[in-house]
Image (cartoon, rainbow, N blue to C red):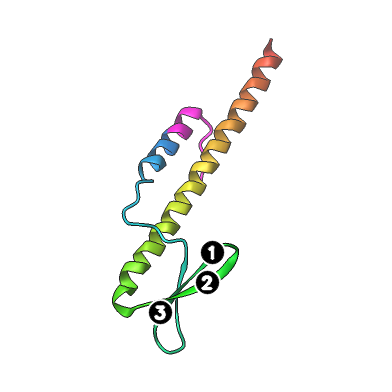
Amino acid sequence: MMLAKHPTLLRRMRDARLKQLTPRCPPLAASLGRQAGGGWHVTLKHRGKTRTVYVPRDLKDEVESWVQEHRRLKRLLQEITELQLALIRLHAVDRVVVHRLD
């Protein structure tokens, strides 16, 4: 992601991503995979252990959308974090420049 150099642009980019954070469906922090017998399963971490749960075929499309929604939200949070860090760094640089000018 290309980061702007001006704080106003960074804030605009951040605010646009914040608006997209509303979940479209319930997110599921898991991976969807095929079983050897032709069925589907989700794999997730629960209390430090990897768990696998069978997914009925008629729920496969819905569960897949839940997993994709989690990935979308995770990506957005990562981008928001990068923008926030850029704002912090830019503020720190501006303060150093102001102190040098004094």
Is the residue under label 1 in contact with that under label 2 (CB below 8 Å)? yes
Position of the C terminus by quadrant = top right
Residue at 35%, 57% (x, y): give it: 26
Mark 3 lies on a secondary structure that is strand
Q: Residue furthest right?
A: 100
Residue 9, magenta (yes or no): yes
What amino acid type is highlighted by mark number 1? His
Mark 1 lies on residue: 46
Counting other residues with Cα less than 10 Å from the Cα at mark 1, is it few (<14), some (14-19), or many (20 or more)? few
**Marks 3 and 1: CB-CB under 8 Å?**
no
* Residue at disc 1, secondary structure: strand
Region in magenta? 1-11
Residue type at the position of mark 3: Trp
Nearest to N terminus: mark 3 or mark 2: 3
Task: Give the left or right position of residue 97, taking residue 30 as reference.
Answer: right
Alpha carbon separation for disc pair 2 and 1:
7 Å
The furthest residue to the front: 47
Indicate which disc residue 51 carries: 2
In the image, what residue type sits under mark 2? Arg
**3 or 1: tag closer to the N-terminus:** 3
Residue 52 or 64: which is nearer the viewer? 52
Residue occupying the point 44% across, 38% down: 14
The 10 Å Cα crowd at callout 3, few under 14, some 14 to 19, many 20 or more, is some
76 sits left or right of 66 in the view: right
Left or right side of 23 for 4: right
Pointer 3: what residue? Answer: 40
User: Percent position (x, y) of residue 88?
Assistant: 59, 31
Residue 96: image tag: none
- Mark closest to the chain's N terminus, 2 or 1: 1
Mark 3–mark 2 distance (CA, rounded to whole Å): 14 Å
Q: Nearer the viewer, residue 83 or 32?
A: 32
Quadrant hosting residue 33: bottom left
